[in-house]
Amino acid sequence: MLEQLLIFTRGGLILWTCKELSNALKGSPIDTLIRSCLLEERSGLASYDYDAPGANYTLKWTFHNDLGLVFVAVYQKILHLLYVDDLLSMVKREFSVVYDPSKTDYSCFDDVYRQLRLEAEARAEEIKKSSKLGARIVSKKQEQGQKTKFDQGGKRIGGGNLKNDNDGDNKLENGYVNGDSLNEDVKQRGSVNDKENMSSNNGAFDVNKLQKLRSKGSKKNDTVVSKGSKPDTKKKVTKKNRVWDEKPQEVKLDYTDPVTENGDEHVNYVAAAIEGESMMDKEEVFSSDSEEEEEDDDQVVDGSKAGTKSKGWFSSMFQSIAGKANLERADLEPALKGLKDRLMTKNVAEEIAEKLCESVATSLEGKKLGSFTRISSTVQAAMEDALVRILTPKRSIDILRDVHAAKEQGKPYVVVFVGVNGVGKSTNLAKVAYWLLQHKVSVMMAACDTFRSGAVEQLRTHARRLQIPIFEKGYEKDPAIVAKEAIQEATRNGSDVVLVDTAGRMQDNEPLMRALSKLIYLNSPDLVLFVGEALVGNDAVDQLSKFNQKLADLSNSPNPRLIDGILLTKFDTIDDKVGAALSMVYISGAPVMFVGCGQSYTDLKKLNVKSIVKTLLK
């Protein structure tokens, strides 16, 4: 039985709810659906499962895009109601007839809904009965087929001999093949696979003759090679000895610990090496250049700009002027296929590109095409709006504001950097530290990568160059305990921020993921940043989903802490292949807070959403 069925506008105004279904929903499944699916461009999904303490619901929905209405049905997850989809479509059809934008009371629709529900339930029962009857017929045929048996001579028990059957299909009946009869038949026909064998009139080619011919040919080739081979009289070219420079140029390679002749630390050198304003504080100017001229054809064919025109200019213009009654899925498919291919060439995961196109198709299906508007431009605009909504953060995370709020409470602001191996966690941690130092925030590093050799020395070098304290306990220590002691030390010495460096780990490494879950559970950091590469492409989806899944499964808390934000590294190496940013945000819902774009401490900036969207659709 349905728990609730309601109709509301895209603006959030509830127009009608079923009064018969007076059960109060536990939790907030409708709000979660709007926030997690409709606003996140996941409206193309078939259903959504809402799981909360004491509430397990399945939600299904449909849209009337021309009127801007949403129809949602809610029922218990354990039930499998076959009539929900049919009921939603009928309610959508009937309610669109009585809908008036100036009207808010639709109590007259109660009787119409009651009749529609009875029709949908009766139709579902008929389909259920017919499916059961079909299953019985299939099972009976299978039983009859299993009763047919054969003896060793190929005779079918109950009549018939496969050797004497003229129909070739009977020889393969019930999966039985008599090898002798098949060979005799092939020899008599002189054919293989229903094709005549032209090499011999007596039947199939003799395999023994073929082997003899091959052996003779190999012997002849061997003799020819042996006779024609002559010893190589040419002298081997000897490699000339390398001449080394007797006085190589002296070059100082180690700049990690610059000192003066007196042995004191060269502070001026360190300041000169890292001076400059971080790119985080520079507003990136987005130049809205004139868009490239669109194709003359009405729709993008096979995703290529140089594709053949699907319709002539006159028919395309006529369709644009007159408009169609409603856009259908078949009208949108060519343009959506072109957009999907374009997104995939920009390194967007195929799964994400397919879901995005499905969501855009759902939002446009049934909508009227405006005058002088082409389908391709309509789909392009809808996809652009969808990408902007996905990449725009749903909640504001202002680190500087949160740092001052934590300082007023007398505790440090804790940031944990997590990610797979080799993505640049330590380097970008130092970039974030440099940006915080420019805003007069005291920072302390915590070397909690006790697994990788050289990790503590690497972080110690960054701390020395930036002249900030570092808390370390060496290797083979519990990183959760090291992080806890580092936070206690920061509380004593008055540090505003603690940046926790963790070991790189693959998403499938359960021991290391368990240690990371323990670190987050024990210390309750204010921000968990996932550090990922901008060039990973499809692997970004697997990395982020597995990290979140492991953190949820291995946590001891009923409300496990997941990833809060993303730091995207190596952004300067991908040219226009910026799709990993979209894949990461879509799969996790976490915003991209930092973008690493170089090797120096100043090479850290914000994500420009407009620039990313333009690059993805270019």
Image (spheres, rainbow, N blue to C red):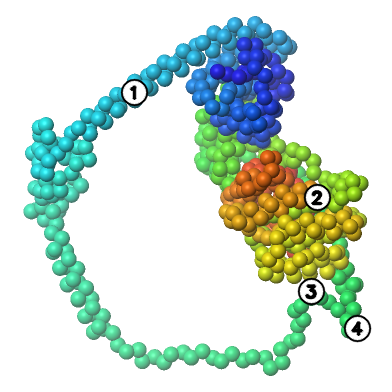
Q: Which of marks 2 and 3 is nearer the N terminus?
A: 3
* Alpha carbons under labels 2 and 1: distance apart: 65 Å
**Between marks 4 and 2 in the image, the one whose residue lies nearer the viewer:** 4
Name the residue tied to disc 3. 256
146 or 536, which lies in front? 146
Percent coordinates x, y for residue 487 in the rendering: 82, 56
> In the structure shown, which secondary structural element does the residue marked by tag 2 occupy?
loop
The answer to which of marks 4 and 1 sits earlier in the sequence is 1
Sequence-earlier tag: 4 or 2 = 4
Rounded to the nearest angstrom, the CA distance separating label 4 from label 2 is 44 Å
Give the residue pinned by disc 4.
262
| Callout 4–callout 2 Cβ contact below 8 Å | no
Q: Tell me whether the residue at label 4 lies in contact with that at label 1, contact meaning CB atoms closer than 8 angstroms.
A: no
Q: Distance from label 3 to label 4 (Cα)?
A: 17 Å
Q: Residues within 10 Å of mark 2 (few under 14, many from 20)?
A: few
Asked whether the beta carbons under mark 3 and mark 4 sit within 8 Å of each other, the answer is no
